[in-house]
Amino acid sequence: MQTGTIARLTDKGFGFIKVEGREKDLFFHSNELIGVSFDSLREGDTLSFEIAESPKGPNAIKVSKV
């Protein structure tokens, strides 16, 4: 598991995680949240997650709040 902080949230049910050492923020979708609702997340919150490859590049899966 890796950790990062929420850089940006959208009103469409997805957001982006800032991960130290990565140039680009990592995409995550609310379908990948475990034990937390999307509406309770705030920018700056710390998340733990795994990284998976998708057709559009890497994204965060199995996302939970730390």
Image (spheres, rainbow, N blue to C red):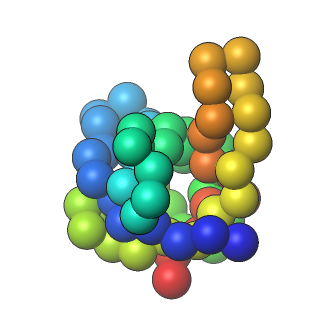
Residue at image point 63% right, 25% down: 57
Instruction: Look at 41% across and 74% down and name the residue there.
Output: 46
Instruction: Please provide percent x and percent y for residue 45.
Output: 33, 72
Position of 10 relative to 42 (above/below): above
Quadrant location of the N terminus?
Answer: bottom right
Q: Position of residue 60 (x, y in %)?
A: 62, 48
Q: Quadrant of residue 36?
A: bottom right
The answer to whether 48 appears left or right of 25 in the picture is: right
13 displayed left or right of 64:
left
Kindly tell me whether residue 39 is visible in this rendering: no
Residue 61 % position (x, y): 69, 50
Q: Residue at x 71, y 16 (%)?
A: 55
Q: Nearer the viewer, residue 35 or 18?
A: 18
**Residue at the far top in the pictured view:** 55
Residue furthest out toward the bottom: 66
On the question of residue 28 being in view, the answer is yes
Height in image: 19 above or below 25? Answer: below
Number of numbered discs present?
Answer: 0
Could you say which quadrant of the image residue 16 lies in? top left
Left or right of residue 25, residue 56 in this image: right
- Looking at the image, residue 38 lies above or below residue 23: below
Please tell me which residue lies in front, 57 or 40. 57
Percent of width and height locating residue 32: 66, 49
